[in-house]
Amino acid sequence: MRVPLTFPPHPNSCIGALPNQPPFPNHNLLTPGIIGGALSCWNHPFEVARIEMQARSVAGQEKLGMLQVFRHVVKEDGIFGLFKGVIPRIGLGIWQTLFMVTGATIIKERFLS
């Protein structure tokens, strides 16, 4: 019979040393802000297509519909061409969500209650 090895949590652990102790301060506000900010990028391929359509218009090239632009981008850059620039956009989405939503909630709790 194997006996599992268990260690007591370190008192300075970020996981929480005590039961019912949150992993870090304001975790109930930060975690949804991070997840919400990251998930706000679901429409990035459409943004890439929109920018491509605008660039074609400025350059005087023929107008293409949304599906035609998708096909053009995939043909030129592969499927990952639709996701170029998504990492900075995820970071921006996280920052905006944390600042505008979570930051406002933290300020309201600290100063107005």
Image (cartoon, helix red, strand yellow):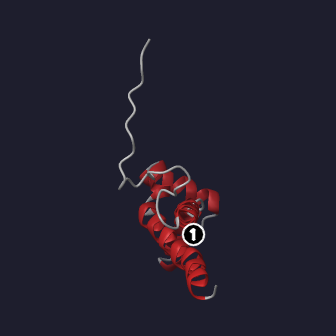
Observer-nearest residue: 34 or 3?
Answer: 3
Q: Does residue 11 sit above or below 44 in this rendering? A: above
Dot 1 lies on which element? helix
- Side (left or right) of 77 relative to 64: left
Give the quarter of the image for residue 53: bottom right
Q: Position of residue 15 (x, y in %)?
A: 44, 51
**Residue drawn at (35%, 48%) of the image:** 10
**Residue drawn at (56%, 78%) of the image:** 106
Which residue position holds label 1? 50
Observer-nearest residue: 102 or 18?
Answer: 18
Q: Which residue type does callout 1 highlight? A: Arg
Tell me if mark 1 has few (under 14), some (14-19) or many (20+) residues whose alpha carbon lies within 10 angstroms of its own. some
Give the quarter of the image for residue 54: bottom right
- Residue 54 visible in the picture: no
**Residue drawn at (60%, 57%) of the image:** 68
Observer-nearest residue: 64 or 104?
Answer: 104
Q: Position of residue 30 (x, y in %)?
A: 52, 66
- Residue 77 visible in the picture: yes
Name, please, the residue furthest toward the bottom.
112
> Is the N terminus in the top left, top right, bottom left or bottom right quadrant?
top left
Q: Position of residue 108 (x, y in %)?
A: 61, 83
Q: Position of residue 71 (x, y in %)?
A: 55, 53
Q: Does residue 29 sit above or below 42 in this rendering? A: below
